[in-house]
Image (cartoon, helix red, strand yellow):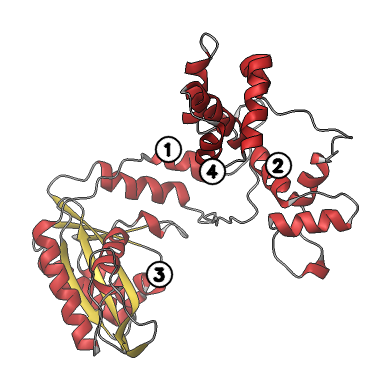
Amino acid sequence: MLRAGDGARLREWTRSSTASAGHVQRARMVLLAAEGLPNAEIGRRVGVTRQTVIAWRARYEAGGIDALADLPRSGRPPVIDEAAIVASTLNPPPPELAVTHWSARLLANHMSRAGMPVSFAEVARIWRAWDLRPHRVETFKFSTDPQLEAKIRDVVGLYLDPPANAVVVCVDEKSQIQALDRTAPLLPMRFDQAERRTHDYRRHGTTTLFAALEVATGKITGDACYKRHRNSEFLAFLKQVARAHPRVKLHVVADNYATHNHPNVKAWLVKNPRISMHFTPTSASWMNMVRIFFGIITRQAIRRGTFTSVPDLVGAIRAFIDGYNQRCQPFRWTKTADQILARADRRPPRHGTTAESAA
């Protein structure tokens, strides 16, 4: 017979995702016993022997639900130097291991050889407790542009508050797009089976896509594919964008690629004062919103495509752009210049100020 209130607690244990497997197993034994099942049947359902069921039933009858807890183990408890494991994790592996970072098993073996026996599971538990993840790596890049703040405010100002009676476009090139042809036909997707393709392929050349994204509408207003991406190709594309937006003030956002600042480009801009160039800071090409479109066309048209020649690739790119312009929507810029600068400024706060006030 169950004691008052034990039934609800035992059922909570069986549904808990944090309770130990042993507690869940014992709770099931007691609940099945309360239903009148014989010990042999309980053992078959739970996965233990009949003697184990008898032992835990006796413990519950003698001590109640608290008696279902784990018994203290005999002998001296293991002593684990958690600080030593954390310190070893924060330091690189020794040169004789010839590895770049620790794994739980590797560190456990290293600590055991050093006279501190520890299991890899215990190392993993300590890593979780201290939020240490040696297997992960992230990248970072600081912009050293001396005009960082001015350029950020200039570009973000065009996104958040574009000038009246003017068009803002983001221009860039996606170079080295490969025309890849698989050595065997693709196998289409089926139920419970993803689309399949061979791992090997044949190369048929490359092309460079120049694109201009109109910020107000999200449309690709000019597209051209060239074999190379020199200043002559960029200037030809810039003239194409200018023809697409005649007799209107045109603001062009571009990155600091050398061809964008070539003397030939500058000379042409002097002759066409209605066109203004706005450059993103160095190491901040992510501010150019046409990069978002490059990611879309890569995922939806290029990466999984099969092309037998460069003209075939160029035709697929232009067909995708034609279809994209029918369903496109403008991308909405949300971060202000102050918010970006607060994250980009890595200088320590001045004396007498806090980090928040300096930001």
Q: Position of residue 104 (x, y in %)?
A: 70, 54
**Mark 2 and mark 4: span between their CA atoms?**
34 Å
- From mark 1 to mark 2, how far is it between C-alphas? 36 Å
Which residue is the site of mark 2? Answer: 126
Q: Decide which of 342, 302 is in the foreground and name it.
A: 302
Q: What crowding class fits label 2: few (fewer than 14 Cα within 10 Å), some (14-19), or many (20 or more)?
A: some
* Residue at screen point 36% across, 39% down: 336
Q: Name the spot of residue 337 as percent of width and height, x first.
A: 39, 41
Identify the residue at image location x=16%, y=81%.
Answer: 315
Q: Earlier in the sequence, mark 2 or mark 4?
A: 2
The reply to whether dot 2 and dot 4 touch (C-beta < 8 Å) is: no
**Image vertical order of residue 244 relative to residue 27, above or below:** below
Q: Which mark is residue 339?
A: 1
Question: SS for tag 3?
Answer: loop
Q: Which residue is mark 4?
A: 345
Q: In the rendered structure, which disc, 1 or 4, sits on the residue that comes first in sequence?
A: 1
Q: Residue 231: horizontal and vertical position, in percent?
A: 33, 79
Viewer-nearest of discs 1 and 2: 2
Marks 1 and 4: CB-CB under 8 Å? no
Which badge, 3 or 2, comes first in the chain's sequence?
A: 2
Label 4 sits on what residue type?
A: Asp
